[in-house]
Image (cartoon, helix red, strand yellow):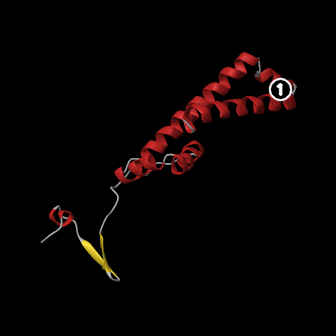
């Protein structure tokens, strides 16, 4: 008598004393994942294991991470741009006092990183 798995077209391979099912993940489009997507991947692997496993086994993990990466990058650059405009950090400051400009921009980038992490990456 065939198992339900075999009735549905599944096959087994003998490994030592055990028959293991021949399982493969569905094909997925390979998209480049940036730093934001990698951070989110690390987070869901450690803290949202069921969600991670569902994405992985359904073949949607890569496209999900690429989307998170794109959204996070857009939010980050928009935040930096808006905060720089609000703080009066301009190209004129960059030309006249480059070290002050670098310090202020680094501070804005850190603030924007914290916001993106809180709202997207670790949400």
Quarter of the figure that contains the C terminus: top right
Q: Which x, y percent locates residue 42? A: 56, 49
Query: In the displayed structure, does residue 114 sit left or right of residue 12?
Result: right
In this picture, is 119 found above or below 4?
above
Q: Which residue occupies the extreme bottom position in the image?
A: 16
Residue occupying image coordinates x 77% and y 23%: 91
Q: Nearer the viewer, residue 12 or 31?
A: 12
Q: What percent of the width, then of the height, locates residue 38?
A: 56, 48
In the figure, is residue 88 to the left or right of 2? right
Q: Is residue 62 visible?
A: no
Q: How many marks?
A: 1
Q: Is residue 7 visible?
A: yes
* Residue 93 higher or lower than 4, as above or below: above
Question: Which residue is painted at 50% across and 38% down in the image?
Answer: 68
Q: For this rendering, which residue is in front, 16 or 105?
A: 16
Task: Name the image quarter holding the N terminus.
Answer: bottom left
- Determine whether the residue tagged by mark 1 lies in a helix, strand or loop: helix
Q: Position of residue 103 (x, y in %)?
A: 82, 31
Residue at horizontal 48%, vertical 43%?
Answer: 66
- Percent of width and height locating residue 90: 76, 21
Q: Is residue 87 above or below residue 3?
A: above
Residue receiving disc 1: 95
Q: Is residue 60 above or below residue 75?
A: below
Crowdedness near tag 1: few (<14), some (14–19) or many (≥20) residues, C-alpha within 10 Å:
few
Q: Horizontal placement of 7 versus 63: left or right?
A: left
């Amino acid at each position: 008598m065939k198992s339900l798995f075999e009735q549905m077209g599944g096959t087994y391979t003998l490994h030592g004393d055990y028959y293991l099912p021949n399982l493969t993940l569905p094909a997925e489009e390979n998209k480049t994942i940036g730093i934001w997507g990698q951070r989110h991947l690390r987070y869901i692997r450690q803290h949202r294991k069921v969600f991670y496993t569902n994405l992985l086994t359904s073949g949607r993990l890569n496209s999900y991470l690429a989307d998170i990466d794109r959204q996070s990058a857009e939010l980050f650059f928009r935040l930096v741009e808006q905060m720089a405009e609000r703080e009066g950090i301009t190209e004129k400051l960059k030309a006249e006092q480059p070290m002050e400009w670098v310090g202020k921009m680094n501070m804005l980038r850190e603030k924007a990183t914290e916001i993106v992490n809180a709202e997207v990456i670790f949400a």
